Image (cartoon, rainbow, N blue to C red):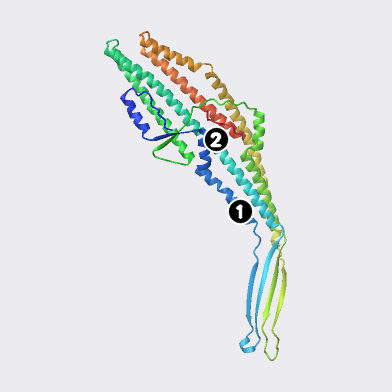
């Protein structure tokens, strides 16, 4: 659906801004549509998802049995001169080991589980970044609307003052000042549009799409999302469910199974061989022999003197200790992060409450009263402009605080490993 941002075209400069905006096709995007598209089309996420089939292929590879070996041998015992005959033999052999294949399969399955946990953790952070980027675009949209409203008010005053000057009711300097203030407001509006445009273009990076003649705008306004949390409960959930901690646990499991595999690789192995040989007739007069064939069965056991060197196993044990240390550090970091973000969210909640006491409504009433009095000649233009700036400042501070509050909520839920945020109205 196309959006029309520039309403109330009151002067020629507005035609320039209108042309800038309408040069592209503008489409709205709800938060649900936005997140669904990211799941399907975000290029980095798509690349990360390829780790799952890679891990599955590794599991299949680990299930492969050792390949047997086939050898063939031909011998000619100087048959042409000494008539000692010829022979041909073949042997089929295979190496057997105890528990090595099972340990390899277990390790590959744990690595697959780690890949799934890392993918979940990647999306946890992607989800947070995407939501904050979407809210940032909503913020600049509301800031743009504040600047648009301010420009409309000042521009109307400038047009009215031009008429008053033509009728001789005010001096030229007053009319000129009004036009000057309208020009300043127009420049601020242009900057607000540039900020809005760039923030919306940032959505394309996460959406995995780019078009020169299309821009996506978020739908709706940034509103307060009220949530009540227990810090103790958040800490418990984070330690239990946060995906990076789940991945850290799998790292410990992988280190343990790598140790098991290292021990199995040092264990007993043996080769079984089954052979067949065929010998032609020996026609030598000194030692004649009929043609014959035979079967052989062999067992070969390698003498693993290298097993006395336990460096590989010791390395595997140290990696377990290392993974456990990383996990404990990650737990401390998660707990600290949850507490910090909980405090930030609580502080911003209190800040936001200040704006819910009618502050904006009162500032709006003041500017409307000043404009009414100015049109009746009861107050000066400077008082009107001061009231307008005060209203603009309060409105922009409210929008910034609302954005910071929403970002803090997103960060808090992300750090705790929970998610129930929806920006759709």
User: Image point 69% across, 54% down: which residue?
Assistant: 103
Find the distance from the CA under tag 1 to the CA under tag 2. 31 Å
Query: Where is residue 235 shown, x and y percent of the image?
Result: 65, 32
Dot 1 lies on which element? helix
Left or right: 293 in relation to 28: right
Mark positioned earlier in the residue sequence (1 or 2): 1
Dot 2 lies on which element? helix
Question: Could you say which is closer to the camera, residue 178 or residue 423?
Answer: 423
Q: Which residue carries the number 1 mark?
A: 58
Tell me if residue 4 comes above or below residue 150 in the rendering.
below
Determine if residue 322 is in view: no
Question: Could you say which is closer to the camera, residue 380 or residue 45?
Answer: 45
Tell me if residue 105 comes above or below residue 3 in the rendering.
below
Q: Which residue carries the number 2 mark?
A: 128
Near mark 1 (Cα within 10 A), the count class, few <14, some 14-19 or many ≥20, is some
Left or right: 168 in relation to 207: left
Left or right: 320 in relation to 184: right
Using the rendered view, name the quadrant where residue 333 is placed: top right
Tell me if residue 381 comes above or below residue 37 in the rendering.
above
Using the rendered view, name the quadrant where residue 376 is placed: top left
- The reply to whether dot 1 and dot 2 touch (C-beta < 8 Å) is no
Left or right: 196 in relation to 74: left
């Amino acid at each position: 659906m196309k959006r029309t941002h520039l309403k109330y075209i009151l002067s020629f400069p507005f035609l320039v801004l209108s042309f800038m905006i309408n040069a592209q096709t503008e489409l709205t995007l709800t938060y649900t549509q936005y997140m669904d598209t990211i799941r399907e089309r975000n290029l980095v996420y798509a690349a990360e998802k390829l780790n799952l089939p890679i891990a599955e292929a590794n599991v299949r590879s680990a299930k492969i049995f050792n390949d047997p070996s086939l050898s063939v041998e031909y011998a000619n015992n100087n048959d042409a001169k000494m008539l000692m005959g010829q022979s041909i033999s073949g042997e089929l052999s295979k190496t057997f080991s105890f528990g090595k294949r099972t340990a390899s399969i277990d390790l590959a399955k744990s690595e697959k589980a780690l890949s799934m946990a890392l993918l979940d953790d990647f999306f946890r952070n992607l989800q947070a970044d995407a939501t904050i980027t979407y809210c940032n675009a909503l913020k600049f949209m509301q800031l743009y609307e504040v600047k648009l409203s301010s420009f409309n008010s000042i521009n109307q005053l400038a047009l009215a003052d031009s008429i008053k000057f033509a009728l001789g009711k005010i001096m030229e300097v007053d009319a000129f000042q009004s036009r000057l203030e309208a020009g300043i407001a127009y420049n601020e509006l242009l900057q607000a549009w540039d900020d809005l445009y760039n923030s919306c273009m940032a959505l394309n990076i996460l959406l995995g799409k780019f078009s020169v003649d299309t821009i996506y705008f978020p739908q709706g306004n940034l509103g307060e999302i009220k949530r009540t949390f227990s810090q103790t409960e958040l800490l418990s959930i984070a330690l239990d469910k946060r995906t990076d901690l789940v991945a850290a646990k799998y790292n410990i499991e992988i280190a343990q199974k790598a140790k098991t595999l290292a021990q199995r690789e040092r264990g007993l192995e043996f080769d079984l061989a089954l052979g067949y040989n065929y010998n032609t007739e020996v026609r030598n007069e000194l030692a004649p022999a009929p043609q014959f064939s035979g079967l052989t069965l062999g067992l070969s056991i390698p003498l693993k003197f290298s097993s006395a060197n336990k460096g590989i196993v010791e390395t595997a044990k140290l990696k377990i200790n290392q993974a456990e240390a990383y996990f404990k550090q990650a737990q401390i970091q998660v707990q600290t992060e949850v507490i910090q973000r909980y405090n930030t969210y609580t502080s911003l909640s209190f800040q936001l409450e200040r704006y819910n006491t009618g502050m904006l409504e009162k500032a709006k009433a003041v500017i409307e009263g000043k404009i009414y009095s100015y049109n009746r000649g009861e107050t000066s233009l400077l008082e009107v402009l001061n009231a307008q700036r005060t209203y603009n400042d309060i409105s922009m501070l409210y929008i910034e605080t609302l954005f910071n509050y929403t970002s803090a909520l997103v960060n808090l839920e992300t750090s705790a490993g929970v998610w129930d945020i929806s920006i759709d109205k």
